[in-house]
């Protein structure tokens, strides 16, 4: 007979009788989570959309001193650098024990 058959698979006995605190692994979704969501949305929605609209904005690209080929090479680098920096930032926070 397994512990799942008892109907109390999530129960943890605490001899002191105190209820579990909310700090035991449960975290709130704060500005750090929204930073990650914004970065992912930029990388998967905004940057590809900008690549699709790039031929229509050729005069704007030329005003920046770039050719269309340069813009197609540079534009995908922006979300790549952004995702990389957010990954390093979150890894450093996780390693330092920051909440």
Image (cartoon, rainbow, N blue to C red):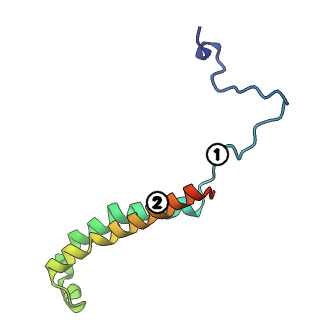
The residue under label 2 is: 37
Is 92 placed left or right of 44 in the picture? Answer: right
Please give the name of the residue rendered at 21% of the width and 78% of the height, measured from the top-left corner. 71
Please give the name of the residue rendered at 42% of the width and 64% of the height, measured from the top-left corner. 39
Is 16 placed left or right of 54 in the picture? Answer: right
Secondary structure of residue under mark 1: loop
Position of 20 relative to 78 (above/below): above
Comparing 85 with 39, the one in front is 85
Give the foreground label among 1 and 2.
1
Please give the name of the residue rendered at 21% of the width and 81% of the height, measured from the top-left corner. 57
Q: CA distance from mark 1 to mark 2?
A: 19 Å
Check disc 1: other Cα within 10 Å, few if <14, some if 14-19, many if 20+. few
The location of residue 20, given as percent across then percent down, is 75, 37
Position of 79 relative to 3 (above/below): below
Please give the name of the residue rendered at 69% of the width and 25% of the height, measured from the top-left corner. 11
Q: Which quadrant does the C terminus fall into?
A: bottom right
Secondary structure of residue under mark 2: helix
Check disc 2: other Cα within 10 Å, few if <14, some if 14-19, many if 20+. few
The residue under label 1 is: 26
Q: Quadrant of residue 17?
A: top right
The location of residue 89, given as percent across then percent down, is 50, 64
The location of residue 52, given as percent across then percent down, is 21, 69
Is 68 placed left or right of 8 in the picture? Answer: left
Q: Earlier in the sequence, mark 1 or mark 2?
A: 1
Comparing 98 with 74, the one in front is 98
Q: Quadrant of residue 31?
A: bottom right
């Amino acid at each position: 007979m397994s512990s799942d058959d008892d109907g109390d698979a999530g129960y943890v006995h605490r001899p002191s009788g105190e209820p579990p605190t909310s700090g035991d692994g449960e975290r709130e979704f704060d500005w750090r989570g929204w930073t990650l969501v914004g970065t992912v949305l930029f990388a998967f929605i905004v940057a590809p959309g900008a690549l699709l609209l790039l031929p229509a904005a050729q005069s704007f690209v030329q005003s920046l001193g770039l050719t269309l080929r340069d813009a197609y090479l540079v534009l995908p680098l922006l979300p790549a650098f952004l995702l990389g920096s957010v990954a390093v930032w979150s890894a450093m926070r996780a390693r330092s024990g920051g909440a």
